[in-house]
Amino acid sequence: MPRPTPRLSTPNQVRIIGGKWRRRLLRFPPAADLRPTPDRVRETLFNWLGQELPELTTLDLFAGSGALSFEALSRGAALAVAVDAGELAVASLRDNAAALGAKGLEAHRADAMVFLRREMRSFDLIFLDPPFRDEWLPRLWPLLPVRLNPGGWLYVEQGQRVQPPPGWEIFRHQRAGQVHYHLLRRVAGNLAGC
């Protein structure tokens, strides 16, 4: 009896887990700090948010593979603005958008801080998954409130539980291996700033 061929791991790709592009693959270039949000974590996040995100606008400041942006678009988001500092990452975001026929993806090559300072729009949902080794959150907190629509959500992935500054509350938190993931909202009465 022949032995089954072992399944090879396929680095540099993730599968969309829900919506109209469910099971479609996203391919991306290798990068040292790139950690695509695992399937299990994305499934939990979109259970928290609801499976349908009709007409929502999203901002992904450390887009990497684009998994979170494409999941949102797959579930009905009108616009997903994906920002990454890597030239190859941004090229793969555009390639994946073309392969899926995703009209709502807007990809930008930029530093997250520079982009937040220049951007004038606000969003319903912001994804924040910066490299764990760098101290991004203290620098980002003050810039986030004006980019988030009233009643909007902030999703944060980090290597430890996040302690948000005053004006934010953790709505949901879970841990998967070394990843802590959080869904936050602005506290009512503190919508003007941090």
Image: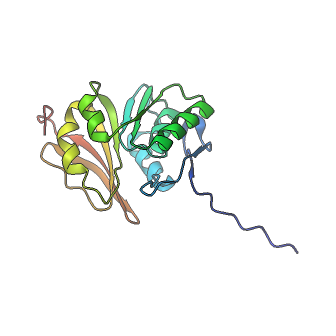
The answer to whether one can see residue 50 in this image is yes
Report the coloring of the rendering. rainbow
Question: Is residue 50 found left or right of 8 in the rendered image?
Answer: left
Q: Position of residue 120 (x, y in %)?
A: 26, 24
Q: Which residue lies furthest to the right in this view?
A: 1
**How many tags in the picture?**
0
Quarter of the picture containing the N terminus is bottom right
Q: Identify the residue shown where x is 36% and y is 35%.
A: 59
Nearest to the observer: residue 51 or residue 67: 67
- Which is nearer the eye, 86 or 182? 86
Specify the quadrant of the image occupied by residue 158.
bottom left
Q: Quadrant of residue 115?
A: top left
Q: Position of residue 28 (x, y in %)?
A: 55, 47
Q: Where is residue 27 in the image (x, y as percent from the top left)?
A: 58, 46
Q: Is residue 107 above or below residue 120?
A: below
123 or 17, which lies in front? 123
Position of 164 with respect to 56 (left or right) is left
Q: In which quarter of the image is the C terminus?
A: top left
Q: Which residue lies furthest to the bottom in this view?
A: 1
| Whether residue 149 is visible | no
- In percent of width and height, residue 30 lies at 52, 53
Residue at horizontal 31 percent and vertical 55 percent from the top: 173
Left or right side of 107 for 101: right
Name the residue: 36% across, 49% down.
129
Residue farthest front in this picture = 87
Quadrant position of residue 177: bottom left
